[in-house]
Amino acid sequence: MIQRTAFRLTFATTQAPYLMARRGLHATPVRLGGYHYPEGPRSNIPFNPHTRFFYLRFIAFCTAGFGFPFGVTIWQSSKNKA
């Protein structure tokens, strides 16, 4: 059993790098096609943070999203228990 383990270690260090497939990252965009989404800061978000009243809409969105579960809980607990 020890000989087999030693053989595996020797084989892994000498032959495994040659057996592993190489990734051709330079060819990936060519295979996927010519179209690519724009890259850079703020290009991956579905809104524009540079508008004039962005902060008001952002605060309203976060308040509504965070407050909705609490509002539903209060409404459900205040209903008549009939």
Image (cartoon, rainbow, N blue to C red):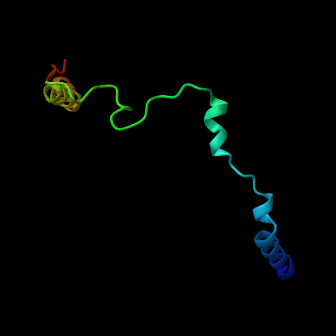
Q: Along the horizontal axis of the image, is 31 left or right of 59?
A: right
Q: Would residue 78 appear left or right of 18 to someone viewing this image? A: left
Relative to 28, is 81 above or below?
Answer: above
Q: Residue 29 sits in which quadrant?
A: top right
Looking at the image, which is closer to me, 39 or 53? 39
Q: Is residue 35 above or below residue 25?
A: above
Dividing the picture into quarters, in which one does residue 28 lie? Answer: top right
Q: Quadrant of residue 4?
A: bottom right
**Residue drawn 15% across and 30% down?**
55
Q: Can you give x and y, in whole percent of width and height, for residue 14 in the image?
A: 80, 71
**Screen quadrant of the C terminus:** top left
Residue situated in front as seen by the camera: 33 or 74: 33
Residue at 62% of width from left, 27% of height from top?
33
**Residue occupying the point 81% across, 76% down:** 10
Q: Total of numbered circles in the picture?
A: 0
Q: What residue is rendered at 37% in x and 31% in y?
A: 43
Which part of the image, by quadrant, shows the N terminus? bottom right
**Residue 68 on image: x %, y %:** 21, 27
The location of residue 25, given as percent across then percent down, is 63, 44
Q: Residue 38 location, x and y as percent?
A: 44, 30
